[in-house]
Amino acid sequence: MTTQPALHGEDGYLTIHGLRHHYIRWGSVDNEPLVLLHGLMNNARYWEHIAERFVDRWCVYAPDLRGHGESEHAPGGYLVWAFAMDLRGFVEEMDLEAFDLVAHSIGSRIAMAYARDHSHRIKHLVLADMGPQMADQGARGIRRSTGEAQKAPGFATEAEAIEHFARLYPGRDRDFLLRQVYASLQLDEESGNLVFRFDPAIHQATGRGAIAEIPYLWESLEHITCPTLVIRAEKSKILSPEIAEEMVRRLPNGRLVEIPDAGHQVPLHQPEAFSRVVREFLES
């Protein structure tokens, strides 16, 4: 790999429950705090193209979840309660008395578990394309993709890796794509390939343990008192219309927005629409 490019955003590291956690901060610490939670097999750098749309008013924080990016792998596992405890530790370490929280995919499940007992600290909560449970087709798809990712050979060259991220982030320059490569991949000494950084054991987050979390998360919604926006991608196979509507019914202060022409990775598929919807909600 070539020399690592200068990073956009400031990197930080914390020790939470004995694990080293990495996060990225964009914007002035004098601004109001906004925390972004990524999904399974992603990392904090996933949010760069979204964060840049909010730094005029917010100080944006994006942690690498345990087992992802530069955060340590977790021998204790990857159930939602562990992730939520990490988020609580992050909020306390960063001394965020009141903040906005935007979460996508598995990050939304973490946000539900955290907000159950801490919604008094959250000014606005956004749950993007994930509910307490997944539509059957989407659940099978995520379990399959997690398994396939564990067996994937990775990328033989940096150029192949850049091409992969160029498809995810169309129109972005080479420096941006290199930051995605370095945040997401690491060199596998045995094969010589660039492979994804996440812990292979994260499949626990979609296994039998996750099924046991479903009733807990449904009930958690009823305790979340802060204004909450549920975002559903029109083409989502993860969050069905029925589940999204039931979420809003159970939330004391919830509303639903559907973003057209987007699949589950709605921040990638429709970044402008996603950012506009989120910003309008945070400013409401």
Image (spheres, helix red, strand yellow):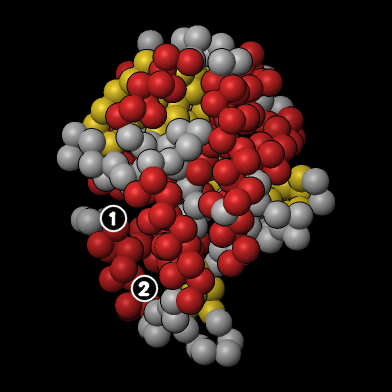
Q: Tell me the distance, in whole angstroms, between the alpha carbons under discs 2 and 1.
A: 12 Å
Q: Is residue 176 left or right of residue 185?
A: left
Front position in the image: 123 or 176: 123
Residue type beneath disc 1: Tyr
SS at circle 1: loop
Q: Which residue is found at the position 70% from the left and 54% from the top?
A: 77
Which of the numbered marks, if any, corresponds to residue 169?
A: 1
Front position in the image: 263 or 4: 263
Q: Which residue is found at the position 48% from the left and 15% from the top?
A: 250
Q: Is residue 213 left or right of residue 180?
A: right
Q: Is residue 176 left or right of residue 14?
A: left
Front position in the image: 1 or 36: 36
Which of the numbered marks, if any, corresponds to residue 128?
A: none
Q: Which residue is label 2 attached to?
A: 161
- Residue 96, percent from left and from top: 66, 25
- Residue 228, percent from left and from top: 46, 18
Front position in the image: 119 or 52: 119
The answer to whether 254 is drawn above or below residue 47 in the figure is: above
Q: Which residue is found at the position 38% from the left and 41% from the top?
A: 135
Which quadrant holds residue 80?
top right
The answer to whether 204 is drawn above or below residue 34 in the figure is: below
Q: Earlier in the sequence, mark 2 or mark 1?
A: 2
Residue type beneath disc 2: Ala
| Mark 2 residue crowding within 10 angstroms, few (<14) / some (14–19) / many (20+) | many
SS at circle 2: helix
| Mark 1 residue crowding within 10 angstroms, few (<14) / some (14–19) / many (20+) | some
The answer to whether 17 is drawn above or below residue 214 in the figure is: below
Q: Which residue is found at the position 60% from the left and 15% from the top?
A: 223
The answer to whether 216 is drawn above or below residue 37 in the figure is: above
- Residue 269, percent from left and from top: 25, 46
